[in-house]
Image (tube, grey):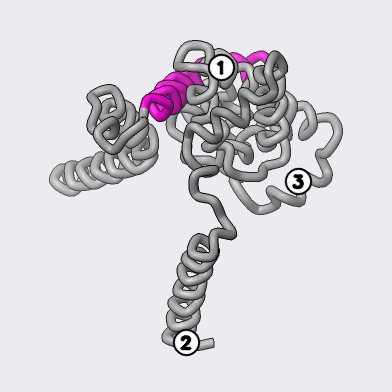
Amino acid sequence: MSVPKKRILKLLTGIMIVVGIWWLVYCQCINLSSLKPAALRDFIQSFGRLAVLAYIIAYTLNTISIVPPIAGLSLAAGLAFGEVWGAVYLMTGAMIGTSATFMISRYFGRGLIEKMLKGKFKDLDQKLVQKGFMTILFFRVVPLVPYEVLNYAAGLSRIQFKDYFFATFFGLIPGVVISAFFGGSLGDIKTFKDILAPKFLVAIGLMALIIAVPAIYQFVKTRFSKEKNTEKGKVK
């Protein structure tokens, strides 16, 4: 298929999706109120005393299954339990989930995981062998490698579990704290004016910063490489 035809097909597909969503809302097949932050919070809290356990299990299973959206569950922690306890429960689910994927990859699913990652992230495997702790810590803080891929790839490498565990723990702290804070701020939104509240604006800024970290890193790395090559050219 030629490039123009592919673009036209993508455009038509996009239009169909938009029209389809509009129709579902118009015919009230989808109740938008159920998608509000408060609705998600109410759903999690509907488990009562088991709400915390249900959340941690859900997050763990989501991490193991590699099914998105893990980000949505991350925000749900602060929304349902508040910034502080939300961060604690989110970190608990994340550590259990990442540890489980590591163990599955190393002891049970090596053949399957190797097929999934075949030909991909070879440099990552080499770095994990040479500098396991620092490599995991770096990629947790600067998520250039997908979250779930890093979990399984680490299990296939020769990195020690304690290095993987503690690097993951310390590397996840910034993202966990900001996600819980942002989720908690969503719970304070009752009207449109609340979107302009200082707390929510700060939360949006922090989330934007976390999301932009990989792009910032790539920009700085490219800029540094260009300057280095320029200096080498001048020396010659």
Q: Is residue 235 left or right of residue 44?
A: left
Does label 3 or label 2 sit earlier along the sequence? 2
User: Is 184 part of what is drawn in magenta?
Assistant: yes
Residue plotted at (43% across, 32% down): 142
Which residues are drawn in magenta? 160-188
Are the residues tagged 1 and 3 within 8 Å (C-beta)? Answer: no
Q: Residue furthest left?
A: 234
Alpha carbon distance from label 1 to label 3: 25 Å
The picture places residue 20, in percent across and down from the top left corner, at 53, 69
The picture places residue 144, in percent across and down from the top left corner, at 47, 40
Q: Is residue 221 above or below residue 206?
A: below
Q: Residues within 10 Å of mark 3 (few under 14, many from 20)?
A: some
Task: Name the residue tied to disc 3.
Answer: 114
Task: Name the residue tied to disc 2.
Answer: 5
Q: Residues within 10 Å of mark 2 (few under 14, many from 20)?
A: few
What secondary structure is the stretch in magenta mostly built from?
Answer: helix
What kind of element bears circle 2? helix
- Foreground: disc 1 or disc 3: 1
Q: Dividing the image into 4 quarters, which one contains the N terminus?
A: bottom right
Q: Residues within 10 Å of mark 1 (few under 14, many from 20)?
A: some
The picture places residue 84, in percent across and down from the top left corner, at 47, 11
Residue plotted at (27% across, 26% down): 202
Alpha carbon distance from label 3 to label 2: 36 Å
User: Is 186 part of what is drawn in magenta?
Assistant: yes
Tag of residue 169: 1
Give the image quarter of residue 47: top right
- Name the kind of residue labelled 1 in the image: Phe
The picture places residue 154, in percent across and down from the top left corner, at 66, 31
Depth check: give the residue in front, 115 or 17: 17
Q: Is residue 222 above or below residue 168?
A: below
Residue plotted at (36% across, 31% down): 190
